[in-house]
Image (cartoon, grey):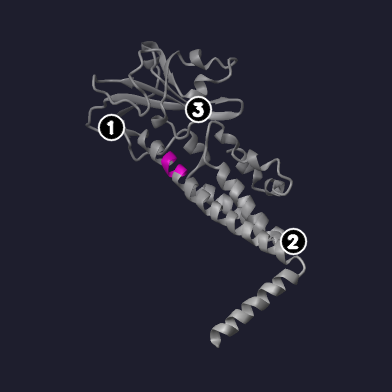
Amino acid sequence: MKRGRIHHMLRIGRAAGRTAEGGRARFWALLAATAVVAVTLCSLVATAATWEGREQRGAARVPTLADHGHQAAALWSRYWDSCQGRQFTVVVIAPLTKDAPLPPGVARWPAPGEVFLSPALAEGPASEDFTHRYGTSVGTVSAEGLASPGERLAYVRPTTAMLSTARMEGITGYGGPGPVFGDLRIVGPRSSMMAVIGVLLGLRLWDWRQRRPGWALWEGTVAMLCCTLSVPAGRHAPGWTSGLRPGPSLSGLLSLPCSPFLSCW
């Protein structure tokens, strides 16, 4: 008897769903929203994994400074340069011993006046002349030494004349506890990126809910999906928010006060 009552109630629910105004459209909208939520969660996991890989590669190239009383194996220094409004790091290295450790991603020690460039710099604008800007380019930095595929980075070995005037620190190896450099220094830690995305999506979802309660879940999850799919960096990592610009429904994300901060990424 109990089973028959449940079956009867299900039949009533199905009949009401068919006859209710917009019932079928609501069903498909909720189904689509559920699917987008699932894809969004998977994208968040993939984003976190991508960011973790960046941080690991960034930490592996941080130099270990030679303590007082310990012999340094190499000299190391860095400075900022810029191209088209975007800063990047130029690292100056010079060996002091025959077995001096190489930075990750550098295949061999460059000779004095030679340079290893990241692919993004090696393929940069001809007007910038990166292949001769810091010396003679003799190779590229492999993916192992880059935080992201599109990172701009150069390893320069100075000439004897340059070395005599440069301020450099003695190091014993890499993977030290010091601060990161390169794109990770500009973008900041993963927690900052996640916090900014969370605040933007939360504010935008609240706005959608005030104006269109029935579509808040759908549009909010689509916005989250677009954000998370655009975060994993490729060759054009600085414009990871540009994928949100064309959509009329999502363009409001960029009208928030935090947008200038995001656009600099």
The foreground one among 60 and 257 is: 60
Q: Amino acid at mark 2?
A: Arg
Earlier in the chain: of badge 1 and badge 2, it is 1
The residues bearing labels 3 and 2 have C-alpha atoms spaced at a distance of 43 Å
Earlier in the chain: of badge 3 and badge 1, it is 1
Task: Kindly check if marks 3 and 2 are in contact, taking CB atoms under 8 A apart as contact.
Answer: no
Query: Which stretch did the figure color magenta?
Result: 50-54
Residue matched to label 2:
212
Task: Indicate left or right for 8 with 153 as reference.
Answer: right
Residue matched to label 1:
66
Earlier in the chain: of badge 3 and badge 2, it is 3
Task: Indicate left or right for 104 with 257 as reference.
Answer: left
Task: Indicate left or right for 191 with 265 as reference.
Answer: left
Is 42 located above or below residue 116 in the figure? below
Badge 2 element:
loop
Q: Residue furthest right?
A: 21
Give the foreground label among 3 and 1.
Answer: 3
Q: In which image quadrant can residue 73 be found?
A: top left
Q: Residues within 10 Å of mark 1 (few under 14, many from 20)?
A: some
Quadrant into which the N terminus falls:
bottom right
Query: Residue at 58% of width from left, 19% of height from top?
Result: 125
Query: Residue at 35% of width from left, 13% of height from top?
Result: 111
Is 75 located above or below residue 234 in the figure? above
SS assignment for the magenta stretch, majority: helix
Task: Kindly check if marks 1 and 2 are in contact, taking CB atoms under 8 A apart as contact.
Answer: no
Query: Residue at 72% of width from left, 69% of height from top?
Result: 18
Q: Amino acid at mark 3?
A: Arg
The foreground one among 179 and 239 is: 239
The percent position of residue 191, horizontal first and vertical second, equals 49, 50
Query: Residue at 39% of width from left, 40% of height from top?
Result: 56
